[in-house]
């Protein structure tokens, strides 16, 4: 079991973490042992000056995302406000990736999956993932792609917000061409050579409703937190 309430986490120094963006900066105070145990990124800073000074500056991480990560660090779960807007969820995934926290990433993905039963994935999400510097092979991009394709084929709908049109235009892609590309990338569907050129669902279920250890990252031999949860009830 993950020793999240280990008292030794909270006895030592408090690290000041300043999140800097173009316009402003925000300070967060987090117990340093907790940060170093859960984030190899912070553990690696310890021998260096900024680690010793108890003050770390982060420019690559979104401030709202870091707030969610701090909540997660102390509770091993996300706050109730982590359902506001999928962009925050994606940015939190990127922040957890930057801070080298696979367990946190796995939980973000499962959280996203549970939200997408109500908030649909759309192409703008993939645009954001790309703008954050990630390719199509990162787990969250694979999941979002699968979800968009699933919705497009199964429910004959896809979802655009206003800004997504701009993304599509910027990319120089016709919407349908983009959808076709997504479908080719998705592992769930294939274009059936049946003379009708119809995309067909190969019998896969809704990615948002698929339970279990999917799209997760685990170190070798590491137990999935989902298994931990089962273990404690058994
Ligand atoms: Zn897992």
Image: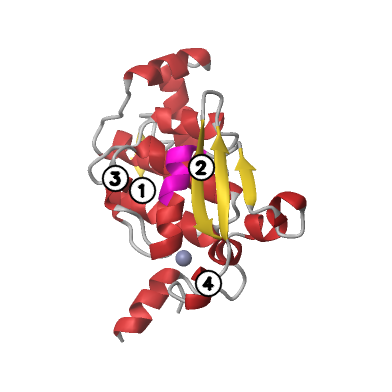
For residue 17, side relative to residue 189 (left or right):
right
Residue located at (31% from left, 87% from top): 234
Of label 4 and label 3, which has the lower sequence position?
Answer: 4
Residue 30 vs 127, above or below: the answer is below
The residue lying toward the viewer, choosing from 79 and 14, is 14
Of label 2 and label 3, which has the lower sequence position?
Answer: 2
Q: Can you identify the residue that label 1 sits on?
A: 112
Instruction: Evaluate if marks 1 and 4 touch, with contact meaning CB atoms under 8 Å apart.
Output: no
Q: Can you identify the residue that label 4 sits on?
A: 11
Cα distance, mark 4 to mark 2?
A: 20 Å
Residue 74 vs 158, above or below: the answer is below
Q: Can you identify the residue that label 3 sits on?
A: 83
The residue lying toward the viewer, choosing from 69 and 231, is 69
Q: Nearer the viewer, mark 1 or mark 2?
A: 2
Q: Can you identify the residue that label 2 sits on?
A: 27
Q: Give the quadrant of residue 58.
A: top right
- Residue 17 x/y as whole percent: 56, 47
Of label 1 and label 4, which has the lower sequence position?
Answer: 4
- Residue 107 x/y as whole percent: 42, 58
């Amino acid at each position: 079991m993950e020793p999240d309430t280990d008292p030794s986490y909270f006895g030592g120094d408090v690290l000041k973490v300043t999140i800097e963006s173009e316009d402003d900066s925000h300070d967060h105070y987090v117990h340093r042992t907790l940060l170093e145990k859960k984030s190899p990124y912070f553990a690696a800073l310890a021998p260096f000056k900024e680690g010793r000074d108890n003050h770390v500056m982060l420019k690559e991480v979104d401030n709202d995302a870091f707030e969610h990560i701090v909540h997660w660090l102390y509770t091993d779960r996300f706050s109730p406000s982590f359902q506001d807007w999928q962009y925050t969820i994606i940015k939190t995934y990127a922040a957890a990736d930057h801070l080298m926290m696979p367990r946190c990433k796995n939980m973000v993905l499962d959280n996203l999956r549970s939200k997408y039963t109500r908030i649909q994935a759309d192409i703008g999400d993939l645009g954001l993932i790309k703008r954050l510097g990630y390719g199509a092979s990162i787990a969250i991009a694979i999941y979002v792609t699968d979800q968009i394709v699933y919705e497009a084929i199964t429910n004959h709908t896809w979802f655009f917000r206003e800004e997504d049109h701009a993304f599509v235009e910027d990319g120089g892609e016709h919407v349908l061409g983009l959808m076709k590309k997504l479908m080719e990338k998705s592992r769930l569907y294939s274009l059936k050579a049946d003379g009708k050129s119809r995309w067909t669902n190969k019998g896969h279920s809704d990615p948002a409703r698929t339970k279990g250890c999917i799209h997760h990252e685990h170190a070798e031999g590491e137990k999935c937190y989902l298994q931990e949860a089962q273990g404690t009830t058994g």
